[in-house]
Image (tube, rainbow, N blue to C red):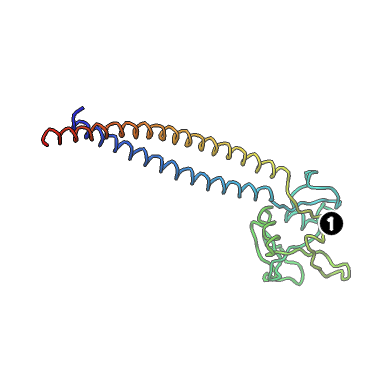
Amino acid sequence: MGLSASQGRFLTLTARKNNIEFQVQQLTQAKLQLAEQQDTEAYLWSNGMNIQHLYYSADGTGSISDDLPRLSYQICTASAQDGGLNMRVLDKYGRIVVSELPDPLPEGKEVGDYVIEKNCTQADYFEKNLLNGNWRLQQPSKQNETGWQNVTLEGCANIYQGVDSKDYAVAENDYSLTVERLENIEKRYDMQIQQLTNEQKAIETEMDSVKKVIDKNIEETFKTFG
């Protein structure tokens, strides 16, 4: 191979080597992003393992594993005869939470005594406001027939708070599927990096050989004109 051809070949190999190095850098960056995604999924999984809900037990016994119903506005405000807790729900300003104004208004009550919350009958919305302290529960006072007294979630024997096994199973399954998918992507990245690394080594070996040819051609050229 002549000097000109050797130099052309060397430049071509150099360009290929640089391109491979760039591809390896991209794949390495993709792996770092994948690792961040795995950390995010682990965090979401951890949160999923600790999903707390409020549940209702009519007789104050049992556990969440017994498939107790979620605590709801309807259960809290329904009468005992209708299977409820005979409570009322107040917001942090002391207004009675309702989905719509009672018609007619109870004796002694005004419109300003109420706050309309259209979503209060949705279990998640109701639960969120109770747990955040935006709303509180009251039950009829035992000392005053016409009065009401505050009741805490912990102080009510009919209310349970804990992790639902179904939520746990869903979070566990979602996490396992996601981790498996991410691991398969990582393996594919590793294979591509290994293939590129092997190709890079082969190119470097050939570049060394071509470099020797170029050096030899230069040396012989100097001898000819020396």
- Closer to the camera, 154 or 5? 5
Secondary structure of residue under mark 1: loop
Q: Check the picture and name the quadrant holding the N terminus.
A: top left
Residue 146's spot in the image, x, y percent?
84, 70
Residue 126's spot in the image, x, y percent?
69, 57
- Residue 144 against residue 212 in the figure, above or below: below
- Residue 147 against residue 82 in the figure, above or below: below
Q: Residues within 10 Å of mark 1 (few under 14, many from 20)?
A: few
Q: Check the picture and name the quadrant holding the C terminus.
A: top left
173 with respect to 186 (left or right):
right
Q: Quadrant of residue 207?
A: top left
Q: Residue furthest left?
A: 225
Q: Residue furthest right?
A: 143
Q: Amino acid at mark 1?
A: Ala
Instruction: Name the residue at 29% across, 38% down.
Output: 15
Q: Which residue is mark 1?
A: 157
Q: Quadrant of residue 214?
A: top left
Residue 25's spot in the image, x, y percent?
41, 43
Instruction: Name the residue at 73% across, 49% down.
Output: 163
- Closer to the camera, 126 or 87? 126
Residue 95's spot in the image, x, y percent?
70, 69
Instruction: Name the residue at 46% across, 43% down.
Output: 30
142 with respect to 192 (left or right):
right
